[in-house]
Amino acid sequence: MCVPGCHAAVHNQLNRRGLFKAGAAALAAGSLATAASRAEARGVRVFNRVVDLTHTLTPDFPTYIPDWALSIEQLTTFAENGFNTRRYSMVEHCGTHIDAPIHFAAEGATADEIPLADLVLPLAVIDVRAKAAENADYQLSPDDLKEYEAKYGEIPEGACIAMNSGWAAKAPGDGFANRDDEGVMHFPGFHVEAADMLMSERGALGIASDTLSLDHGASSTFDTHYAWLPSGRWGVECIAGLDDCPATGATVVVAAPKIGAGTGGNSRVMALI
Ligand SMILES: [Zn+2]
């Protein structure tokens, strides 16, 4: 039996679709609370809300190389053809997107080959907004990771670590790529020493940057890309919505495109909280 209020409370803990069947079964058994704990025991993560970590992609969204942007063509219209269809064209690394290992390696997994289980991970959000506001070339460092762990505990194995530099709010304006007069971009990224620590000491599987690159914008050597991706790990660039995520406790879902042999691709990224 449920005490008064129990159904509402437990309903809020169950996601409406994923656990619908579990919820229905539990109702039949007379206890949703039992179903929720059973689901957790089976490893199903219970969550209350979903946060969109994806920028809406439009043709004016900045890209690392300016002519990599999205273009759209209207193929049919409802008025003329009875149905609407568009064709779009873009480079794989456009908008909120995944970098597959093959992007910076002679051999490695393509986007379609990344195991689904590696795309649903615990999410650690590292807040470097204050430092990035002072220094557009800021690189997230091992000290930032240690500072995070002193507050929130050790980053769990198999996690995705996201950098919140505050840059998502600048898109799609010019401040997002932040090109100077010479065309050099200035935005934050992961320092290669932080990437090394996450690989060798924390067993991380993904990193996500809220800027146009895993490396800081002024980099010409792409040290973090060359250290991280060839190790078989993935990255997400142009992640959004991190202000609405807790520092710890969320699960990130990266819905990478399953286009054969992709080096990456525009992805719907979300956090289950
Ligand atoms: Zn990319």
Image: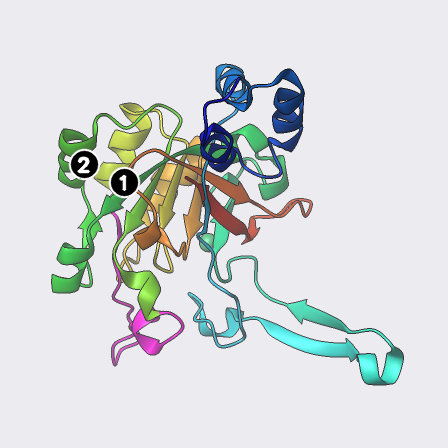
Residue visible at 19% across and 63% down in the picture: 136
Q: Residues within 10 Å of mark 2 (few under 14, many from 20)?
A: some
Based on the picture, tell me whether residue 187 belongs to the magenta stretch. yes
Q: Label 2's element?
A: helix
Q: Residue at x 49, y 14 (%)?
A: 41
Disc 2 residue: CB within 8 Å of ligand 1:
no
Q: Is residue 115 visible?
A: no
Q: Earlier in the sequence, mark 1 or mark 2?
A: 2
Foreground residue, 90 or 242? 242
User: For mark 1, what is the residue?
Assistant: 247
Instruction: Report the Cα–Cα distance between label 1 and label 2.
Output: 8 Å
Residue 230 x %, y % = 44, 36
Is 104 above or below relative to 197? below
At which x and y percent is residue 270? 48, 47
Disc number lying in front (1 or 2): 1
Which mark identifies residue 153?
A: none
- Residue 4: image location, x then y, percent: 46, 28
Tell me the tag on residue 148: 2
Tell me the magenta residue range.
Answer: 171-190
Quadrant (top left, top right, bottom left, bottom right) of the C terminus: top left
